[in-house]
Amino acid sequence: MDRETARVEAFSDGVFGIAMTLLVLEFHVPQLEHGNPDVRRQLVWALLQLWPSAIAFLLTFGTVLIMWINHHGLFKHAHGADNRLLFANGFLLLIVTFVPFPTWVLAEYLDRAAANVAATFYCATFVLVSVSYNLLLWSVIVNRKHDDPRSGRIIQRVRRAYRWGFVAYAIAAVVSMFWPYVGVAICFSLWPIWGMLRYYEREMKT
Amino acid sequence: MDRETARVEAFSDGVFGIAMTLLVLEFHVPQLEHGNPDVRRQLVWALLQLWPSAIAFLLTFGTVLIMWINHHGLFKHAHGADNRLLFANGFLLLIVTFVPFPTWVLAEYLDRAAANVAATFYCATFVLVSVSYNLLLWSVIVNRKHDDPRSGRIIQRVRRAYRWGFVAYAIAAVVSMFWPYVGVAICFSLWPIWGMLRYYEREMKT
Amino acid sequence: MDRETARVEAFSDGVFGIAMTLLVLEFHVPQLEHGNPDVRRQLVWALLQLWPSAIAFLLTFGTVLIMWINHHGLFKHAHGADNRLLFANGFLLLIVTFVPFPTWVLAEYLDRAAANVAATFYCATFVLVSVSYNLLLWSVIVNRKHDDPRSGRIIQRVRRAYRWGFVAYAIAAVVSMFWPYVGVAICFSLWPIWGMLRYYEREMKT
Amino acid sequence: MDRETARVEAFSDGVFGIAMTLLVLEFHVPQLEHGNPDVRRQLVWALLQLWPSAIAFLLTFGTVLIMWINHHGLFKHAHGADNRLLFANGFLLLIVTFVPFPTWVLAEYLDRAAANVAATFYCATFVLVSVSYNLLLWSVIVNRKHDDPRSGRIIQRVRRAYRWGFVAYAIAAVVSMFWPYVGVAICFSLWPIWGMLRYYEREMKT
């Protein structure tokens, strides 16, 4: 992996990192009046009431972390940063910075009547995430030196996983129009797949 | 490219990355009352009403991404980071961090009577962007070792593109006082030129 | 320390850095009316009234700085970034980005009747911080090449410090339910231990 | 300069970069009513009314940029990152992240009766900036290998500049209690000194 690719990675890391850190701004310190006799109980209660923000924080953080780990894995196979890779990566970063917004919408509306709208919006965003990873994979494959059979086998496996990922998210988006909880559950059931997807074989590492 | 230049690049990447990531703060979760019978339709409507924010987000993201790719290309020719380069780069970063503001103003007023004011403000900012890239190019040329004829030819081409870019943005700023859509269209018609400007020849890469 | 570990470090540094920098957003410029005859005295007073924000700023900044220095020390012993290290580090970053929130709650309520609630919340967060550092240490130990006896001795010392740290924070969380000031004091009394914990011996450095 | 120092530099660069980028959040898009017949003139006027934000933006950006360039210069002489350097650098970063706040206060009150309070607050912050740079210089000197006479001569020159800088800022803080414009002018009159302070001789570079 050469110097240019390293710069693209470092830039992307910055964007991933900031997207993750901005999430804490969603937590607001509960404002209770001074001189309130029952302030202790109320503060406990107010902190417990922050649970939707806590869930949104955890979900988004986990999602972006897993996206970052996959980005990390994918770039192990990148050689050289041409314009194709720069734009595919740019599109992916566009989606990364956007992901917090549908997550907040989901957290706000999941326990209400409009849950299916919020869940469809959320799953549709992940269809875009999937498209952006497929594009990045494609631009990595085009740039790749074709001399390593093991790398080729791994790329094939990753490619298949990404394609089925796209299909799964599209199904989730349609399903969540009618059963929002099922749609969101499909999205999260894919976490372990992305978290565990291996981008190198143990022997390659040595 | 030496270590000092790499540090300047990494610092600039951080500023570019943060400028791009802060944009998602423009999206606000729609606040609908609890117990509203028609909340589904209203949430769909409220999300659709965010289109000006979405356009501002896309335009600014694309602009800063293209500026970053050009910054990336320009630094391939930089050798050593003297005070001249540090200040030229600092001026460019000043404009980079400012770019989101005129974009938000444009998104707010483009469909209203004050469109020409917003468009002129927007195009005038790009005149400054152009000035900053010309300054950075100049400081890169001054520091360059004069031993590579291919690098010289490329620099000449880039220089010509930057000069005509300055002229085009100045014209756009004047035109947008009267026909705002035409002025903005001139700005965006230059995107492909900046996106495709080659800073190295295929042979140099090998 | 190889290239992959360096990337994880750089990414973590970004998250630490942003968490520290976002704190200044807590300071709001005092808004006094124009034409106020006694505006000088009032501005002095308004600036002095910002002391809780100043304390929150200093405490959080110091805490995150010390966490970063320990992260820095721990990674000196890391060799290779497998999924275990990536997830342990990801959990730690989750807590890092969250730390500002309990600090703000503490600053808001430490001088009021609900001080024990805020202090318990604060100390409980540090129990999580301690858990995340123990997890990261564990994943570093598993990846470590077992060929350096000095590194082994240091790791033993760090491990003991981390375990006792967990116990101390758990005690602080319980104590602060009744005596909030004592609980918080226990937390800060551990600062010098973390600040001075040596991750290498002087001879190793040479 | 070794790998550890490079990591401290990269971390500091992140903090400097974010502090600079957050400034654009100070600009708010003017909100004019829809259907206003005179909206063009009002938008021009509203944008012109943002001049205090523009000045605050420019001053802070310039100040942090110059601080960054000096940090860059100082680290050229740093060898190894011990706890002393980490804490001196941490104190400096604390002040860096704080600098935007007194700048905003100054921009808000410089044209009003409380100008001397705001100016004293502003200059006092720069006394702290000066203290932090003197501390960092000291920790760099202690770590330095004593084998380069040219490096020694430069360090002497930088040391003298930093000491006189401290004196100048202290005088500015006292003067601005009575003549705010003079105090602020003293602060900015030092910009060229910091901007031009040379941390290496031309021969060293080769």
Image (cartoon, coloured by chain):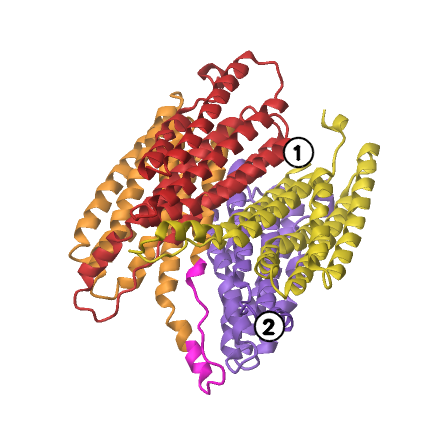
Chain colours: A yellow, B purple, C red, D orange
Q: Please identify the residue farthest to the bottom as the structure is shown.
A: D37
Is any part of residue B81 visible from this angle?
A: no
Gap in angstroms between the C-alphas marked 1 and 2? 41 Å
Front in this rendered view, residue C22 or C55: C55
Residue at 69% across, 59% down: A180
Mark 1: amino acid: Asn
Q: Residues within 10 Å of mark 2 (few under 14, many from 20)?
A: few
> How far across and down, in percent of the image, does residue B110 sit?
56, 76
Mark linked to residue C83: 1
Magenta-highlighted residues = D24-44
Instruction: Say if the magenta span includes residue D41.
Output: yes
Residues flagged by tags 1 and 2 on a common chain: no
Mark 2: amino acid: Gln
- Name the secondary structure under disc 1: helix
Q: Which residue is mark 2?
A: B49
Left or right, residue C46 beside residue C184: left
